[in-house]
């Protein structure tokens, strides 16, 4: 057998840098010297997913996964991990893996509910807060309100994306007023009754998607005018709000200088970003408002999108525009334009 470990550290490092992440991790268990020379000095681009529910690590670049067993991760794609092991051992093993490979977390998956305990959750959050490694996305599939509230109030690490629990969250009625960590790119929540305007104002992310949000016409008006005045949410590029009940669109736009545009003659392009649109999308019609620096926001209350530059306005889109145009221009306050879906594109 070739005496690899007897070579100078720099030579071993050059060899180890050619190995796949799993190979490097397994080599580190041969000896103390193997562990020391295995540590990568630069960030590994082999993005990993940490599934805290199944206690597995998934590799996006080269495929495959490792499951947790006793005090380390082992390669075995089919057998489930043991969830009976003390979570401290799991976190220690994960930290050891990160120390060696210097990988970046692409995603961390959570289920914030039993059998996970409150103490285990707090321990996991504190461990994540102390990580030197970047975490891009946190996805919470299911949660009890008590555990989710602990996460929202205790987590501190800057991330790119947060997907809050989708359905099944039995909210206790306490509204969260402040986000205590940074979300750079996107925030998604459904249902969304658990936060309100102060929480949104405190969030300077690029995209917000909030379904079943308890927001009145006056609330949304305050949100839009704050954006127009350049006070809050200056980095926003896309907003999806679905309110709990229909609200008066004219009240939403009151004082915003909104102009209702004809989808047959007006279109703007929302450029491909790689995160929100896989291709350029053309927005026809809608209501145009502008920020104090001239930046345009297009507000749509329907799901009509156009993926080709020369595509004509759809018949249903034109019919809806002509119908609401009468209400928009009417001085009769008894006529209402009521909607619950608001898609906002900031161009």
Image: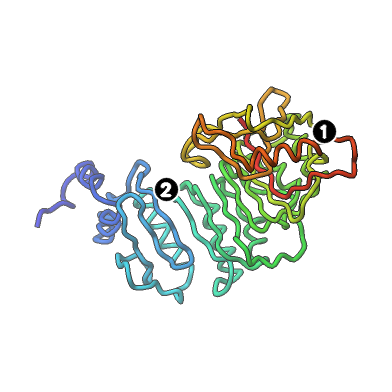
Q: Which residue shows up at 28% across the image and 51% down it?
A: 38
Between the C-alphas of marks 1 and 2, the distance is 54 Å
Q: Earlier in the sequence, mark 1 or mark 2?
A: 2
Find residue 329 and name its label: 1
Q: What quarter of the picture does the C terminus occupy?
A: top right
Identify the image quadrant of residue 15. Answer: top left
* Of 154 and 338, the residue lying toward us: 338
Q: Is residue 266 above or below residue 220?
A: above
Residue 47 versus residue 292 in the image, above or below? below
Q: Position of residue 102 (x, y in %)?
A: 38, 48
Quarter of the image for residue 291 reads top right
> Horizontally, is 297 left or right of 95 in the view?
right
Residue occupying the far bottom of the picture: 84
Q: Secondary structure at mark 1?
A: helix
Locate the N terminus by quadrant: bottom left
Q: Position of residue 253 (x, y in %)?
A: 79, 36
SS category of the residue bearing label 2: strand
Q: Is residue 227 left or right of residue 18?
A: right
């Amino acid at each position: 057998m070739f005496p690899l470990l007897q070579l100078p550290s720099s030579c071993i490092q050059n060899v180890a840098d050619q190995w796949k992440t799993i190979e490097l991790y397994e080599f580190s268990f041969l000896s103390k010297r193997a562990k020391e020379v295995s540590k990568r000095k630069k960030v590994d681009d082999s993005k990993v997913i940490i599934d805290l529910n199944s206690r597995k690590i998934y590799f996006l670049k080269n495929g495959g996964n490792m499951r947790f067993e006793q005090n380390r991760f082992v390669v075995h794609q089919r057998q489930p991990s043991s969830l009976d092991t003390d979570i401290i051992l799991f976190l220690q093993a994960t930290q050891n893996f990160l120390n060696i490979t210097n990988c970046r977390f692409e995603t961390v998956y959570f289920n914030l509910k039993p059998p996970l305990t409150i103490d285990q959750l707090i321990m996991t959050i504190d461990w994540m807060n102390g990580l030197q490694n970047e975490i891009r996305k946190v996805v919470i599939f299911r949660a009890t309100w008590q555990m989710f509230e602990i996460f929202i109030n205790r987590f501190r690490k800057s991330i790119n994306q947060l997907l809050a629990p989708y359905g099944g969250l039995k909210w206790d009625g306490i509204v969260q007023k402040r986000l205590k960590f940074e979300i750079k790119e996107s925030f998604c929540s459904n249902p969304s009754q658990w936060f309100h305007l102060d929480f949104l104002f405190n969030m300077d992310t690029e995209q917000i998607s909030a379904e079943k949000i308890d927001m009145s016409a006056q609330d949304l008006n305050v949100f839009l005018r704050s954006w127009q005045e350049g006070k809050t949410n200056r980095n926003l590029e896309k907003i999806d709000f679905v309110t709990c009940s229909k609200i008066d669109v004219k009240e939403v736009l009151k004082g915003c200088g909104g102009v209702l545009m004809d989808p047959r003659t007006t279109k703007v392009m929302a450029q491909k970003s790689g995160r929100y649109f896989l291709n350029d999308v053309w927005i026809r019609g809608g209501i145009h408002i502008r920020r104090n620096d001239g930046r345009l926001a297009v507000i749509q209350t329907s799901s009509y999108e156009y993926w080709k530059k020369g595509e004509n306005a759809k018949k249903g889109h034109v019919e809806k525009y002509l119908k609401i145009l009468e209400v928009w221009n009417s001085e009769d306050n008894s006529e209402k334009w009521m909607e619950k879906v608001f898609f906002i594109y900031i161009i």
